[in-house]
Amino acid sequence: MTTTHQTDDEHASPHELQRKLSNRHLQLIAIGGAIGTGLFMGSGKTISLAGPSILIIYMIIGTMFFFLMRALGEMLLANLHYKSFIDMAHDLIGPSAGYYIGWSYWLGWILVGIADLAAIINYLGFWLPEGVAFTPMGQALISAGCVLFVLGINLLTVKLFGEIEFWFALIKIMAIIGLIVIGAVMVFTHFHSPDGSIASFSNVWSHGGMFPKGGSGFLAGFQIALFAFVGVELIGTMAAETKDPEKNLPKAVNAIPTRIILFYVLALFIVMSVTPWNLIPADQSPFVTLFLHAGIPTSAIIMNLVVLSSVMSSMNSGVFSTSRMLFGLAKDGQAPQALSKLSKRAVPAKGLIFSCFFIMAGAALQYFVPNTIEAFTLASSLCVILFISIWSIIMVCYIRYRKINPELHEKSTFKMPGGVWMSYIVLIFLFFTLIILALEPDTLKALIISPLWLIILAVTYQVLYKPRMKKLNKKL
C-alpha cells in the first residue's frame, strides 16, 4: 500500500503532482462541480423559459453526464498514469486531440473566470456603499482582490485548495438542504404567499401542465441548464492528486445521479410548489424568493453569501483545473516548458499565475465593451460550445479505448454501463445541444465565431508544436 501521506507538502517532489486530495475533498469538490452557479443565479430564467419541464431537462442532462463521468472514470482507473483527460486524448486519439482538449479546457475556464468576476462585482454591490462597486476603480480593485485571493489559495498547497473548496461546497449544500426543508414545511402547512398563492405540490403541474411553453420552451431550457453543469468533469483533472483513486473516484462518480436529483430536481420542485412557476421572477433567484416568502428577514444576506461562495468556488476550481491542464500540455511539449515546473510545494505555480493573468486581462476588457451583457452572453455561450466539444472528445476517447484496449476493459472493476452504444447516445445528445444553440440569436453568434478558435489552434499546432516535436525526435 502506498504511503503518499508520509511526504508533506514542503518536501514534495518538484517534478510530479502529489496525491493530497482525500475522499472527503473529492466528494465535496465533485458536488461543488455538479452544483453550478447557474442553479442559484440562472434558475429563475430557466423556469420562465421552460416552466416545470425544467425538471425533466435536468434529469435528462444529469443522466447523460452520469454516463459521461462513468466513461471518464473507467479510463482514468484503467491507466493511473493519466494525469487528466489531456493524457487520455493524446494517448487514445493523438497529440492533436490532446492539444485541442487541453487548450480549449483552459480557455473555457478562463471565460468562466471572467464571467465569475462580473457576478462577484454585482453581488458585492449588496454590501458596499451605493455606487462604489460599479465605478471603474471599484471594479478593478474587487477583480484584483478576488484573483489574488484565489491565486494565493492555489499557490500554497493542493491540500489547502481541497480544504477551501470543501467549505465552499458545504455552504452550497447547506443552503439547498435548508431550502428543501423550509419549502417542504411551507407546503405541508399550506403556506399563503404574499402574492396570494397557496403552497402545494399541485402548483407544479396545475398552471398549464408540465410543458406550458410547448416544445420551443422545452428546448430553450436546455441551452441555459447545460451551462449549470460546466465543472461536473472536474474530477477528471484531479486524478493525479487524489489519494487511493481506485476507491475514491468511483464513489464520487456514482454519487452524480443522487446529486442531480437532490440539488437540482428536488430543490426546483419545492421552489415551484411554494410559488407557481409563472409567478417566479425571471431576473431573481427563486431561492431568495422562497426564503423571503418564509419570512426570514436575513434571507437576502444569506443568499448573497451563498451565491458569492458559489461564484468564488467556481473561480477557485477553474484556476486549479487550468493550471493542471497547462502542466499536462507542457509535459507533452504542447505549451511553454516553464509551465511544466512545479514549486517546492508540488504546485504548478507558473501555470496558476499564467491563468490568473488572463482572467484579469479578460475582466479588464469589459471596460472597453459598450454592451457588457451582450459581451458576457457571447462569452458564456462560447464557453458552453467549448465544453460540449470537450465532453464529446471524452466520449470519442472511450470508444477508442474500447477498440484499442479491450483487455483493460475486461479487467476493469468500474465498467461504464451500456459501453460503446451508450457512448454514441451521449454523443448524439451533445450534438443535439449544439443544434439547440443555433436556434437562439445570441448563441448563434457564438457558434459562428467558434471556428476562429479552431483556426488559432490549428495554426499554433502546426507552427509551434510540430517543429518542436521534430527536434525532439531527431535528438532521440
Image: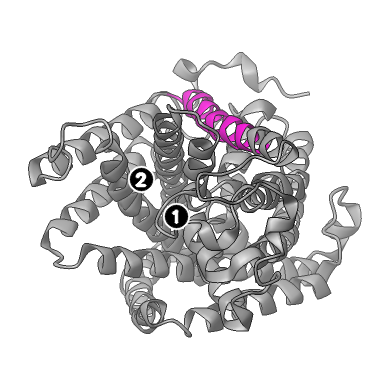
Q: Position of residue 223 (x, y in %)?
A: 52, 70
The picture quadrant where one finds residue 382 is bottom left
Is 231 covered by the magenta stretch? no
- Most foreground residue, 22 or 54: 54
| Residue at 67% over, 75% down | 429
| Residue at 31% over, 30% down | 149
What secondary structure predominates along the stretch shown in magenta?
helix
- Most foreground residue, 457 or 161: 161
| Residue at 44% over, 55% down | 329
Q: Is residue 85 left or right of residue 406?
A: left
Q: Residues within 10 Å of mark 2 (few under 14, many from 20)?
A: many
Mark 1 lies on a secondary structure that is helix
Q: Position of residue 372 (x, y in %)?
A: 22, 63
What residue sits right under mark 1 in the picture? 329
- Most foreground residue, 224 or 450: 224
Farthest residue, direction front: 196
Mark 2 lies on a secondary structure that is helix
What residue sits right under mark 2 in the picture? 339
- Tell me which amino acid carries mark 2: Leu
Vertical arrangement, residue 385 with respect to residue 295, above or below: below
Q: Is residue 305 left or right of residue 49?
A: left
Q: Residues within 10 Å of mark 1 (few under 14, many from 20)?
A: many
How far apart in space, not on screen, are marks 1 and 2 (Cα)?
A: 8 Å
Mark 1–mark 2 CB contact (< 8 Å): yes
The picture quadrant where one finds residue 251 is top right
